[in-house]
Image (cartoon, helix red, strand yellow):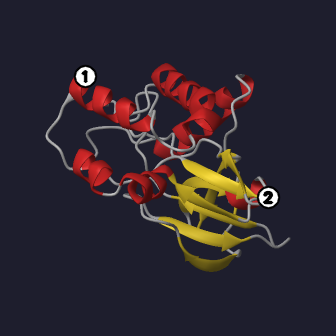
Amino acid sequence: MKDVSEWIFTGYGENSTLEKLELLSPDQVPYIIKFPRHFDGKRTNWEDVNEVIAAEIAKILEIKVVDAEIAYRDGRRGCLMKHFRYQWGAEYGETASSLLSAEFEDEFDDLQNSNLKNEQLMYKFFSLFKEFSLFHFFKKDFVFMNLFDILIGNQDRHAHNWQVLYIDDKPIFGPLYDNGASLGWQLSR
């Protein structure tokens, strides 16, 4: 496992419930290190390890995923990921949440804040998603993402946790990331 304590700190990661740092490797490659949350000691917390395991499973299944490995920074263990925009050569990327909110405005925002549960929420989202301007480009990738999440028991796939990348101004479905809340990540000890 590598120690990235000497890598250059360039900022804090995007919105997240977990602490993320943006780093620049000695060979000038941008990375993100994500640290697992702290629990009360009554449960395990292997979000960082599970992120790496999930990435390896996705690679075996030939699903696009971030490059992830365990690393240490200042004595703290975390999941080190090559910044996927750099990894995939994208000029920029947008979360699905940003794109859906921009396209559907209040309808998407109301859905995120609704009290709908389970089947009602899924039906409403899929009805809206089928109207999304990029739906026909991404429906296969979207289905594979959801099947993968079912396989690994991912509890954290929401519209902020998948992106559309733009390469030469063409949209592509981004690699999977934020797969750590899976594989029994909160098992009691």
Q: 10 Å neighbourhood of mark 2: few (<14), some, or many (≥20)?
A: few
In terms of secondary structure, where does tag 1 sit?
helix
The amino acid beneath tag 1 is Glu
Asked if 93 appears above or below 43 in the picture, the reply is: below
In terms of secondary structure, where does tag 2 sit?
loop
Q: Marks 1 and 2, Cα distance to the nearest angstrom? A: 37 Å
Q: Is residue 55 left or right of residue 185?
A: right
Along the line of sight, the residue nearer the viewer: 66 or 122: 122
Q: Is residue 69 left or right of residue 49?
A: right
Q: Residue furthest right?
A: 27
| Visible residue check, residue 54 | no
Chain-order first, disc 1 or disc 2: 2
The amino acid beneath tag 2 is Gly
Q: How many marks?
A: 2
| Visible residue check, residue 101 | yes
In front: label 1 or label 2: 1
Q: At 25% from the left edge and 22% from the top edge, which residue is drawn?
A: 119
Q: Look at mark 2 in the image and give the residue it sits on.
A: 89
Q: At 22% from the left edge and 26% from the top edge, which residue is drawn?
A: 120
Residue 119: mark in rendering: 1
Q: Give percent across and percent down for residue 124.
A: 29, 32
Q: Give percent across and percent down for residue 44.
A: 37, 38
